[in-house]
Amino acid sequence: MKKTLEFLKSLNISSTDYIIVGCSSGPDSMCLLNLLYENDYKVICAHVNHNIRKESKDEYDYLKNFCNERKIIFEGLELKKEIKGNEYYYRKKRYSFYKKLADKYQTKYIATAHHADDLMETILMRISRGSNLKGYVGFSKVFNEKGYLMIKPLIFYTKDEILDYLTNKKIKYFIDSTNDSDNYTRNRYRHNIIPFLKKEYPFIHKKYLQFSNELEKANRYINGVVESEMKKNFVENFIDLNKFSFLEDYIKECELERIFSQLYGDDIDLLSKKVVNNVLMQLKTNRNFTIYLPKGYEIKREYEKLIIEKRQLSKEYRTVLKDYNIIDNKHIIEKTNDTLNNSNYLIKLNSLDIALPLYIRSRKDGDKMQVKNMQGQQKIKQIFIDKKIPPNERKRYPIVVDANDTILWVPGIKKSKFDNDNGKKYDIILKYIRKE
């Protein structure tokens, strides 16, 4: 296990730092736990009993006794039996537990027992089902995840080498019976493909590790390019398409994947590569669009912006106009004495020409207005399109109507024929202010 120890030494782990070790009591994690213990690292054994198999309780008790005999701190989590979930669910539970322990013991190091065979299986599975460059790496031997340093010290060694270590050290371990079943995709790779590859080339695991390292270097370089471009075109929750459109397609793809990864975190598997491809395809049409994403998010084009945000439920509204009105903390309509402003931000009305009281409401399908100095009526929807009001904002944009629901004013955009110029009679003056 020389390479593992050299790798650990390169991390410059302090003698006072704990290492959280995810340990199942299987051969891989027992090897890692014992190796760290025998080389004087301060370890916390973190064990999660999923309560799926009847042997789980025996494994829990054995591991706890193993740690007590060696004065290793043991931290166990037992999940309720009635909880049912897939491997993704249980993985989230485990890693959440590990991170809580890292916080408790004020350390950043979390070690798992993934080894060379695991790396080969992961790479092959990702190639088969499709992934991105980061996915084809398999997994890194060290990865910084929001301040936690996730390390895989056994990545240099195969399963057979780990079993030899345990035999020499006379360390007891447990075998999960589900690992024997070919009902699981990974097991079929493990039982059929990996042995064939090893037979063809006994040191094939070293080639896969080299392959992973090369891809990781390429991925690191590309990430640097993406990060640099994001600083130029990504602001708060939107991409500036004037800058984004000049990038190479692959960099665009990587930037979207980076944004989604930041947004979804551990739930990134909820998004497939098809979503990114769909967004890029829609951008080529130069049309506004909205794509609904999992967990209540949406990505939408609004002219020269590509916005990623939580989906807002559009609610129709209608409220009596008062002296001072705020809509969505953005639109302000107030009564004023200002008579000099002739822009679309101010309207002067004669109460004898309209039906009181006045209302502020949201747009409805089929809305039309007799625009000042124009013949006939114009659809409010078309007015919004002409003024490039974003589609999502159109649903909540305030419209001033009278008691008969006659549209008098689209504040800041268009006034109706009921607006009176100076010199004509008016007794109601309304002013529109937009907060950015």
Image (cartoon, rainbow, N blue to C red):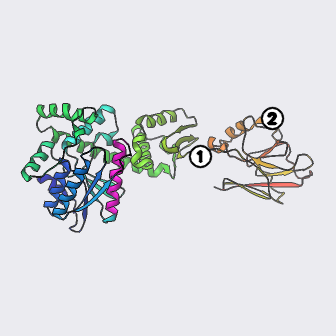
In the visual, does 397 lie left or right of 171?
right
State the image coordinates of residue 116 (x, y, percent, origin top left): 19, 43
Front position in the image: 187 or 78: 78
Q: Can residue 322 be seen in this view?
A: yes
**Which residues fall within the magenta stretch?**
79-103
In the visual, does 193 lie left or right of 290?
left
- Image quadrant of residue 208? top left
Nearer to us of marks 2 and 1 is 1
State the image coordinates of residue 69 (x, y, percent, origin top left): 16, 62
Label for residue 248?
none
The residue that disc 1 covers is 312
Q: Count residues near mark 1 (Cα–Cα under 10 Å), then give few for <14, some for 14-19, many for 20+.
A: few
State the image coordinates of residue 271 (x, y, percent, origin top left): 43, 39
Label for residue 377?
2
- Separation of residues labelled 2 and 1 (CA atoms): 31 Å
Q: What element carries label 2?
A: loop
State the image coordinates of residue 181 (x, y, percent, origin top left): 24, 34
Q: Count residues near mark 2 (Cα–Cα under 10 Å), then give few for <14, some for 14-19, many for 20+.
A: few
Seen in the picture, residue 370 relative to 65 is either above or below; the reply is: above
Q: Is residue 210 visible?
A: no
Seen in the picture, residue 233 relative to 364 is either above or below; the reply is: below
Judged from this view, the residue extending furthest toward the left is 168
Residue under the image location 49 percent in, 44 percent down: 295
Residue under the image location 34 percent in, 37 percent down: 131
Residue 100 falls within the magenta-colored stretch: yes
Q: Is the magenta stretch mostly helix, strand or loop?
A: helix
